[in-house]
Image (cartoon, rainbow, N blue to C red):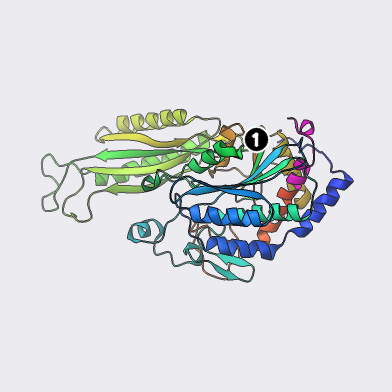
Amino acid sequence: MQPTVSVPFSAEQMMWYEQACARIDPKRLQNLLFELTNIHSPTGAAGAASQFMARHLESVGLSARYQPMSATSGNVLAERRGSGGGASVLLYAPIDTHLEEGDEAQEILTGKAPEADMQITARMIDDWVFGLGASNPKGMVATLTEVATALIEAEVPLVGDLLVGMADGGMPVDIAGRDHAGMSNGVFHLLNRGGSPDFAVIMKPWNWVYHEEPGMAWFKLRVHGTLGYAGVPRDIPGFRSSVVPAATVIQELERWIIDYAERNTSGQIKPHGWIAGVRGGDVQRPAFPSAVTEIFFDVRVNPRTSPAEVKAQFAAFVRELQAQRPELDLDWEMYGSVAGGSTDPQNWIIQSCQRGWEHIEHRPHGQADLLGGQTDGAALRRLGIPTARIGWPWPAQGAPLPVAEGLGGMGATYVPDLIPCAKKIMYALIDTLTRPRHELGL
């Protein structure tokens, strides 16, 4: 890891930076986050949340517009133009949440989910905001909005253009009933309709600056047998269970996924994966063991590894497994894939964000923790936009209400945790938007 390139602020830039940071208002951020969390915005149905943010961004001094993608889905893009001759910087976050309103089908995914961070109604206690997506993505949306608001209020004389964008479809899902929303469909729409900048900053959890993010590959692995009947003995001629052998396949697959992550680790990325579920049979026909048991899973794709290469690695695993266990009847398919994306770590926006990080943390940035989380940042980079990912310590600790273990609803935010990240992003904006293009390598 090379040291961060030093480009000191002028006295005037430091003055602008301190004036802008002084305008960051944690209570205003918290109130916006509470209001936004109260607008349910599952993937493919985030239109109301985006319209709300378009109105809000307009009210704080940006020129904002709502970009519909369907009757229920849309994005928001806002702009504050500088005097001219500078670069454009997009502050970006997705706006959709990963879960729907609770129903019997979703309960299989989430469990009973009584915790505060799993509810679609927001709650605010002291410096905390709870509710589905209150941390990810809506904590990011509110923080980026507060940064833009404070920058405008400080009347910093911008040379370049500030863009603020939020898009539906940012979650790693594929919602067939809503025009296959997800897998970064919204950010492509946003960029293709006026939102393409010179640089982008995406806010996401973890207190580091990342110059790259993984993609993902979705697979189905089917174990075949024959249709059975509960009332016959296990030695009935011709019957082969698909369910019991699937247990063996799951154990072998779990070992392969762990080994895959180790073999494909490089740069800032460790491409983890998990078995997501097992499907087979008919709950209304428990007397009839299923002829097919399906295992489905996601493994992440390092930017230096193509989805086609991951597919080839998995194909080799299946061939080897069948050779070792010829009694297994297997077939498989890759049913979804997104490539990873990387920006040159020496690019201006990466170095600028690292300078901001070091200014607040008072220490060298050093090597970031390895990353496996996938975001729209990968899509931004694949489209040729130099993109820095920057975040905050996550998950928040010491919540006054019960919250779900693991990722849960990604909806417990301690607002003071967000403020250092806001100041790091502000540093990168002052650093970038108050300079002419030629100083930025453009």
Magenta stretch contains residue 201? no
Name above or below for residue 341 compared with residue 124.
above
Q: How many marks?
A: 1
Residue to which mark 1 is pinned: 386
Q: Residue at x 59, y 38 (%)?
A: 194
Tag 1, which secondary structure? loop
Q: Could one spot residue 266 in this view of the protein?
A: no
In percent of width and height, residue 157 lies at 80, 46
Label 1, residues with CA under 10 Å away: few <14, some 14-19, many ≥20: many
Vertical order, 401 against 393 (above or below): below
In this rendering, position of residue 189 left or right of residue 205: left
423 relative position to 73: left or right = right
Extent of the magenta region: 427-442
- Determine the main secondary structure of the stretch shown in magenta: helix
Q: Nearer the viewer, residue 405 or 303?
A: 303
- Location of the N terminus by quadrant is top right
For the point 68% across and 66% down, which residue is it? Answer: 27
Q: Which percent across, then down, holds residue 158?
A: 77, 44
Viewer-nearest residue: 387 or 19 = 19
Measured as percent of width and height from the top left, residue 439 is found at 79, 33
1 vs 286, left or right, is: right
Front one among 234 and 364: 364
Which residue type does callout 1 highlight? Answer: Pro
Q: Relative to the observer, which residue lies in front, 299 or 144?
A: 144
Quadrant where the image shows the C terminus: top right
> Does residue 222 lie above or below 394 as drawn?
above
Instruction: From the top left corner, tell me how far across and down residue 319 is, in percent.
Output: 34, 29
Quarter of the image for residue 196 reads: top right
Check residue 440 for magenta coloring. Answer: yes
The quarter of the picture where residue 89 lies is top right
